[in-house]
Image (cartoon, rainbow, N blue to C red):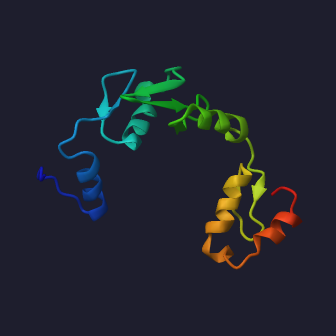
Amino acid sequence: MNCGRSYKRKAHLARHQKYECGKMPIFHCSICNYKCHRRDAMRQHLLSKKHENKSTNYYNFSDNENYSCPTCRKMYKHLGNLTRHQKYECGKRAEFQCPFCNYKCHRKDVLKVHLKNTKKHQHVDFQTILCYDSKF
């Protein structure tokens, strides 16, 4: 389908064709009548001045239920992820640091993924690190 819209970047055209072109908006603001095609647009809308004084903790989007942190407004698809964010991350100092670079995070599992997937750390023997540092 070709709607005639043009984009400077190929990736933006691909995103438009995949999520927007000829499709009905799937995200609906539960506070006002705003509708959009993409989650990032809804996030921007919810952070706008129009909604800055709203005390709603959870925002319902169309068929999917999404959850927003009342402190930082970070959004999650699953309530369990929001709960984990509130318990271990929101407003807390990142306590896990990579022993090879300046990367810090709030959770051990995220640091393990960083160590495994970072190209400059691929030479490292992770079993040695895990035994050496009790934070792992």
Observer-nearest of 46 and 120: 120
Q: Is residue 9 visible?
A: no
> Residue reaching furthest bottom?
123
Residue sitting at x 46%, y 26% = 59
- Give the quadrant of residue 115: bottom right
Q: Is residue 79 left or right of residue 122?
A: left
Please report the residue visible at 83 percent of the width from the left and 71 percent of the height from the top. Answer: 128
Q: Position of residue 78 (x, y in %)?
A: 54, 35
Residue 88 percent across, percent down from the top left: 72, 40
Q: Can residue 33 be seen in this view?
A: yes
Q: In which quarter of the image is residue 79?
A: top right
* Looking at the image, residue 110 lies above or below residue 90: below
Looking at the image, the residue that sits furthest to the front is 127
In the image, 112 versus 68, the foreground residue is 112
Q: Where is residue 124 in the image (x, y as percent from the top left)?
A: 74, 76
Residue at left offset 54%, top offset 24%: 57
The x, y position of residue 40, in whole percent, is 41, 43
Which residue lies at the image location 17% right of the left edge and 57% below the top edge? 6
| Quadrant in which the C terminus appears | bottom right
Please give the count of numbered marks on the rendered protein: 0
Name the one closer to the observer, 126 or 87: 126
Identify whether 96 is placed above or below 45.
Answer: below
User: Considering only vertical position in the picture, is 68 above or below 123?
Assistant: above
